[in-house]
Amino acid sequence: MMKQLFRHNAVFITLSLILLAVLGLALLCIPKAELHLLLCDRHTPARDIFYRYYTQIAEWLPYVICVALLLFSRVGNGVFASSCMIVSALTTQLFKHIINAPRPVTWFAANMPDVQLPLVEGVRMNYWFSFPSGHTTSFFALFFALSILASQNYSQTKTNLLQVILFILATLGGYSRIYLSQHFAADVFAGILVGTLICVLCYVVLYRYEDKKWYNYRIFGRKEAKNTKK
């Protein structure tokens, strides 16, 4: 089961590991404040508009996709995607409330009051519960789950290309949190880990039921034939 998961999703997983390695190295070598200013200080009017609205995708798109999968795909696919989103969100909120870390605007105001963060007009800033990034968790949980589902239904060539696209979309979502100064790089790092690991956990738990009648049931349309891709 795990070999199948990693084999069919090798591109998304490999790119995520590279991103974690690079970001982890940066966290070890560059001070917290310097790294944040380095990553968020590339503002232009076009980027401000893009990231302001793109980051909001994590607030509604995952739930739209989960409902669509439940209604129009195999019920099991919808349960899998929904489980990834719900469990990752609950895990993130648990850590947020236990750690209660300050957001960048709060941290800089207390530790480096002379630094003016490049904020985007119209974005409502948050002040606490910074670690880990919930939006990043949602982005990576959603797009990794879609990668896993796509790998079961398309050729490996198409799946590889789709995984690159899904990874880029997830990464843009994570970076949007730093760009908008809603999170530090460490928060995003943790969000990536939570989102991807929860997907792996949900896959291990749920895909043992792939042969069950309820898993393959379709609420709308004909019952979907069991997937045979190995």
Image (cartoon, rainbow, N blue to C red):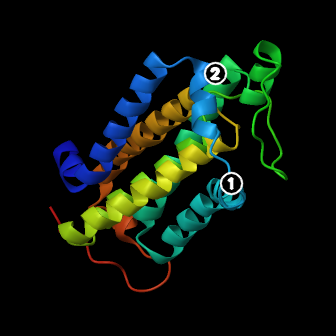
In x, y percent, where is residue 11? 26, 52
- Give the foreground label among 2 and 1: 1
In the rendered image, the vertical position of residue 226 relative to residue 201, given as above or below: below
Q: Residue at x 41, y 42 (%)?
A: 196
Residue drawn 21% across and 56% down? 8
Q: Secondary structure at mark 1?
A: loop
Image disc number at residue 44: 1
Vertical relation: 153 (above or below) 23: below
Instruction: Please state which amino acid type lies under the numbered disc 2.
Output: Ala
Q: Position of residue 205 (x, y in %)?
A: 35, 43
- Mark 2 and mark 1 in contact? Answer it, CB < 8 Å: no
What residue lies at 39% left-to-right and 65% top-to-bottom?
A: 214
Q: Which residue is mark 2?
A: 33
Q: Nearer the viewer, residue 216 or 72?
A: 72
Q: x%, y% of residue 162?
A: 34, 66
Callout 2 environment at 10 Å: few (<14), some (14 to 19), or many (20+)?
Answer: some
Using the numbered discs, state the Cα–Cα distance from disc 2 to disc 1 in whole angstroms.
Answer: 21 Å
On residue 73, the disc is none
Q: Could you tell me residue 84's position as x and y percent? A: 48, 48
Q: Residues within 10 Å of mark 1 (few under 14, many from 20)?
A: few
Q: Residue 147, relative to residue 1: is it above or below?
A: below
Amino acid type indicated by mark 1: Thr
- Residue 152 can be seen in this image: no
**199 left or right of 219 in image:** left
